[in-house]
Amino acid sequence: MQDQQDALEWRAGDVPVSSRFDDPYFSLENGLEETRHVFLAGNGLPARFRSGFHVAELGFGTGLNFLATVQVWRQAALPGVLHFTSFEAYPMGRAAQRRALSRFPDLPVEALEGAPDIRLTIVEGDARATLPHWTGRADAWFLDGFSPAKNPELWQPDLMAQVAQHTAPGGTAATYTAAGFVRRGLAAAGFEVTRAPGFGRKRHMCVARLP
Protein backbone atom coordinates (compact mmCIF):
# COMPACT_ATOMS: atom_id res chain seq x y z
CA MET A 1 0.00 0.00 0.00
CA GLN A 2 1.49 3.34 -0.99
CA ASP A 3 2.28 5.50 2.01
CA GLN A 4 0.47 8.82 1.98
CA GLN A 5 3.37 10.67 3.60
CA ASP A 6 4.91 11.47 0.19
CA ALA A 7 1.66 13.09 -0.99
CA LEU A 8 1.15 15.75 1.68
CA GLU A 9 1.32 19.50 1.89
CA TRP A 10 1.02 21.44 5.14
CA ARG A 11 -1.08 24.52 5.81
CA ALA A 12 -1.63 26.66 8.90
CA GLY A 13 1.44 25.06 10.42
CA ASP A 14 0.43 21.46 11.00
CA VAL A 15 -2.76 20.84 9.00
CA PRO A 16 -2.05 18.09 6.44
CA VAL A 17 -3.51 18.49 2.96
CA SER A 18 -3.70 15.59 0.54
CA SER A 19 -1.86 16.40 -2.68
CA ARG A 20 -3.76 13.56 -4.32
CA PHE A 21 -7.18 15.07 -3.57
CA ASP A 22 -6.21 18.71 -2.86
CA ASP A 23 -8.23 18.60 0.34
CA PRO A 24 -7.27 19.02 4.03
CA TYR A 25 -7.55 16.07 6.38
CA PHE A 26 -9.46 18.19 8.86
CA SER A 27 -10.82 21.70 9.25
CA LEU A 28 -8.31 24.53 8.98
CA GLU A 29 -10.37 26.26 11.67
CA ASN A 30 -10.36 23.58 14.39
CA GLY A 31 -10.23 19.93 13.40
CA LEU A 32 -11.03 18.58 16.85
CA GLU A 33 -14.08 20.75 17.31
CA GLU A 34 -15.25 19.76 13.83
CA THR A 35 -14.95 16.09 14.78
CA ARG A 36 -16.89 16.64 17.97
CA HIS A 37 -19.64 18.54 16.17
CA VAL A 38 -19.99 16.36 13.07
CA PHE A 39 -19.13 12.82 14.05
CA LEU A 40 -19.68 12.63 17.79
CA ALA A 41 -22.71 14.88 18.22
CA GLY A 42 -23.99 13.87 14.77
CA ASN A 43 -24.16 10.26 15.95
CA GLY A 44 -25.52 11.08 19.41
CA LEU A 45 -22.26 10.27 21.17
CA PRO A 46 -21.29 9.73 23.92
CA ALA A 47 -24.91 9.28 25.08
CA ARG A 48 -25.37 6.07 23.04
CA PHE A 49 -22.20 4.36 24.21
CA ARG A 50 -22.41 0.92 25.81
CA SER A 51 -20.00 -1.96 26.14
CA GLY A 52 -19.33 -3.43 22.71
CA PHE A 53 -20.43 -0.28 20.86
CA HIS A 54 -18.99 -0.32 17.35
CA VAL A 55 -17.95 2.75 15.37
CA ALA A 56 -16.97 2.35 11.70
CA GLU A 57 -15.39 4.97 9.52
CA LEU A 58 -14.61 5.69 5.90
CA GLY A 59 -11.21 7.38 5.93
CA PHE A 60 -8.91 6.98 8.95
CA GLY A 61 -6.59 9.82 7.93
CA THR A 62 -4.64 11.20 10.88
CA GLY A 63 -6.61 9.17 13.42
CA LEU A 64 -8.15 12.35 14.84
CA ASN A 65 -11.72 11.01 14.80
CA PHE A 66 -10.61 7.80 16.48
CA LEU A 67 -8.75 9.58 19.26
CA ALA A 68 -11.58 12.05 19.88
CA THR A 69 -13.92 9.05 20.20
CA VAL A 70 -11.59 7.27 22.60
CA GLN A 71 -11.39 10.43 24.70
CA VAL A 72 -15.16 10.71 25.21
CA TRP A 73 -15.49 6.94 25.65
CA ARG A 74 -13.06 7.11 28.56
CA GLN A 75 -14.70 10.21 29.98
CA ALA A 76 -17.97 8.27 30.03
CA ALA A 77 -16.22 5.70 32.27
CA LEU A 78 -18.29 2.78 31.02
CA PRO A 79 -17.22 -0.82 31.54
CA GLY A 80 -16.30 -2.97 28.59
CA VAL A 81 -14.75 -2.37 25.21
CA LEU A 82 -15.23 0.12 22.37
CA HIS A 83 -14.78 -1.25 18.84
CA PHE A 84 -13.55 1.07 16.08
CA THR A 85 -13.08 -0.08 12.48
CA SER A 86 -11.77 2.27 9.80
CA PHE A 87 -11.43 1.74 6.05
CA GLU A 88 -8.42 3.59 4.60
CA ALA A 89 -6.99 3.43 1.08
CA TYR A 90 -3.92 5.59 1.68
CA PRO A 91 -2.53 5.14 5.22
CA MET A 92 -0.65 8.14 6.50
CA GLY A 93 2.96 7.73 7.60
CA ARG A 94 3.60 7.74 11.34
CA ALA A 95 5.77 10.87 11.28
CA ALA A 96 3.11 12.86 9.42
CA GLN A 97 0.43 11.49 11.72
CA ARG A 98 2.37 12.61 14.79
CA ARG A 99 2.91 16.07 13.30
CA ALA A 100 -0.79 16.51 12.53
CA LEU A 101 -1.90 15.27 15.95
CA SER A 102 0.57 17.53 17.75
CA ARG A 103 -2.08 20.26 17.39
CA PHE A 104 -4.22 18.35 19.89
CA PRO A 105 -1.96 17.46 22.83
CA ASP A 106 -4.84 16.43 25.12
CA LEU A 107 -5.89 13.49 22.96
CA PRO A 108 -4.92 9.95 24.07
CA VAL A 109 -2.43 9.34 21.25
CA GLU A 110 -1.12 6.20 22.97
CA ALA A 111 -4.40 4.47 22.03
CA LEU A 112 -3.09 4.25 18.45
CA GLU A 113 -0.66 1.61 19.72
CA GLY A 114 -3.36 -0.45 21.40
CA ALA A 115 -5.27 -0.37 24.68
CA PRO A 116 -7.27 -2.94 26.68
CA ASP A 117 -10.51 -0.92 26.45
CA ILE A 118 -10.26 -0.31 22.68
CA ARG A 119 -10.35 -2.61 19.65
CA LEU A 120 -9.00 -0.65 16.69
CA THR A 121 -9.01 -2.25 13.24
CA ILE A 122 -7.77 -0.42 10.15
CA VAL A 123 -8.77 -2.12 6.90
CA GLU A 124 -6.36 -1.02 4.19
CA GLY A 125 -7.51 -0.72 0.59
CA ASP A 126 -10.31 0.79 -1.45
CA ALA A 127 -13.48 0.64 0.66
CA ARG A 128 -15.48 -0.23 -2.44
CA ALA A 129 -13.56 -3.51 -2.52
CA THR A 130 -13.03 -4.15 1.19
CA LEU A 131 -16.30 -3.14 2.84
CA PRO A 132 -18.44 -5.78 1.07
CA HIS A 133 -16.24 -8.46 2.68
CA TRP A 134 -16.38 -7.02 6.18
CA THR A 135 -18.36 -9.21 8.57
CA GLY A 136 -19.07 -6.50 11.15
CA ARG A 137 -22.00 -4.14 11.67
CA ALA A 138 -21.54 -0.66 13.07
CA ASP A 139 -23.72 1.20 15.53
CA ALA A 140 -22.39 4.51 14.19
CA TRP A 141 -20.64 5.49 10.97
CA PHE A 142 -18.24 8.39 10.45
CA LEU A 143 -18.37 9.17 6.72
CA ASP A 144 -15.17 11.17 6.42
CA GLY A 145 -13.75 10.70 2.95
CA PHE A 146 -12.29 13.66 1.13
CA SER A 147 -14.71 16.16 -0.43
CA PRO A 148 -17.34 14.51 -2.68
CA ALA A 149 -16.33 16.94 -5.42
CA LYS A 150 -12.72 15.70 -5.29
CA ASN A 151 -13.13 12.09 -4.15
CA PRO A 152 -16.55 11.06 -5.53
CA GLU A 153 -15.66 7.35 -5.47
CA LEU A 154 -16.08 7.24 -1.69
CA TRP A 155 -19.61 8.65 -1.83
CA GLN A 156 -21.27 6.63 -4.58
CA PRO A 157 -24.71 5.03 -4.04
CA ASP A 158 -23.26 1.50 -4.20
CA LEU A 159 -20.91 2.26 -1.33
CA MET A 160 -23.65 3.95 0.69
CA ALA A 161 -25.69 0.78 0.20
CA GLN A 162 -22.80 -1.23 1.65
CA VAL A 163 -22.66 1.15 4.60
CA ALA A 164 -26.35 0.49 5.24
CA GLN A 165 -25.87 -3.27 4.95
CA HIS A 166 -23.15 -3.04 7.58
CA THR A 167 -25.16 -0.96 10.03
CA ALA A 168 -26.98 -2.38 13.03
CA PRO A 169 -30.74 -1.70 13.25
CA GLY A 170 -31.21 1.77 14.68
CA GLY A 171 -27.63 2.63 13.77
CA THR A 172 -26.60 6.04 12.55
CA ALA A 173 -24.23 7.82 10.19
CA ALA A 174 -22.96 11.38 10.07
CA THR A 175 -20.88 13.39 7.63
CA TYR A 176 -19.68 16.94 7.17
CA THR A 177 -21.14 17.14 3.65
CA ALA A 178 -24.73 17.86 2.70
CA ALA A 179 -24.19 17.26 -1.01
CA GLY A 180 -27.44 16.26 -2.66
CA PHE A 181 -26.16 13.06 -4.28
CA VAL A 182 -24.74 11.90 -0.95
CA ARG A 183 -28.06 12.46 0.82
CA ARG A 184 -29.92 10.72 -2.00
CA GLY A 185 -27.51 7.79 -1.88
CA LEU A 186 -28.01 7.35 1.85
CA ALA A 187 -31.78 7.62 1.48
CA ALA A 188 -31.81 5.07 -1.35
CA ALA A 189 -29.83 2.73 0.91
CA GLY A 190 -32.59 2.89 3.53
CA PHE A 191 -31.42 5.64 5.88
CA GLU A 192 -33.64 8.42 7.16
CA VAL A 193 -31.53 11.46 6.25
CA THR A 194 -31.67 14.93 7.80
CA ARG A 195 -29.70 18.09 7.13
CA ALA A 196 -28.23 19.64 10.26
CA PRO A 197 -26.20 22.80 10.97
CA GLY A 198 -22.63 22.34 9.77
CA PHE A 199 -19.38 23.24 11.47
CA GLY A 200 -17.68 26.56 10.97
CA ARG A 201 -18.18 27.91 7.48
CA LYS A 202 -20.19 24.90 6.34
CA ARG A 203 -23.88 25.77 6.50
CA HIS A 204 -25.08 22.20 6.56
CA MET A 205 -24.00 18.62 7.24
CA CYS A 206 -26.13 15.51 7.23
CA VAL A 207 -27.06 12.87 9.74
CA ALA A 208 -28.78 9.59 9.00
CA ARG A 209 -30.50 6.83 10.91
CA LEU A 210 -31.32 3.29 9.84
CA PRO A 211 -34.85 2.43 11.02
Image (tube, helix red, strand yellow):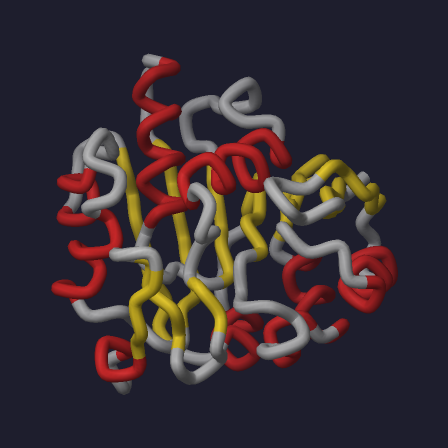
Q: Quadrant of residue 168?
A: top right
Q: Quadrant of the N terminus?
A: bottom left
- Above or below, 17 against 199 in this view is below
Pick out the residue farthest to the top.
Answer: 77
Q: Is residue 74 above or below residue 19?
A: above
Q: Position of residue 188 (x, y in %)?
A: 86, 62
Quarter of the view holding residue 32: top left
47 to the left or right of 68: right
Q: Indicate the position of residue 66 as horizontal and vertical percent values.
A: 36, 44
Residue at 31% across, 40% down: 67
Residue at image position (46%, 45%) is: 29
Q: Is 134 or 25 nearer to us in this picture? A: 25
Residue 75 rendering spot, x and y as whole percentages: 33, 16
Number of numbered discs on residues = 0
Q: Is residue 136 above or below residue 127?
A: above
**172 and 206: which is toward the camera:** 206
**Residue 44, position as x, y percentages in the image:** 61, 27
Taking the spot 61% from the left edge, 35% from the top edge, the residue there is: 43
Residue at the image point whose x is 61% and y is 41% from the top:
199
Residue 28 vs 30, above or below: the answer is below
89 sits to left or right of 91: right
Residue 78 seen from this side = no
Q: Is residue 28 visible?
A: yes
Question: Looking at the figure, which quarter contains the C terminus?
Answer: top right
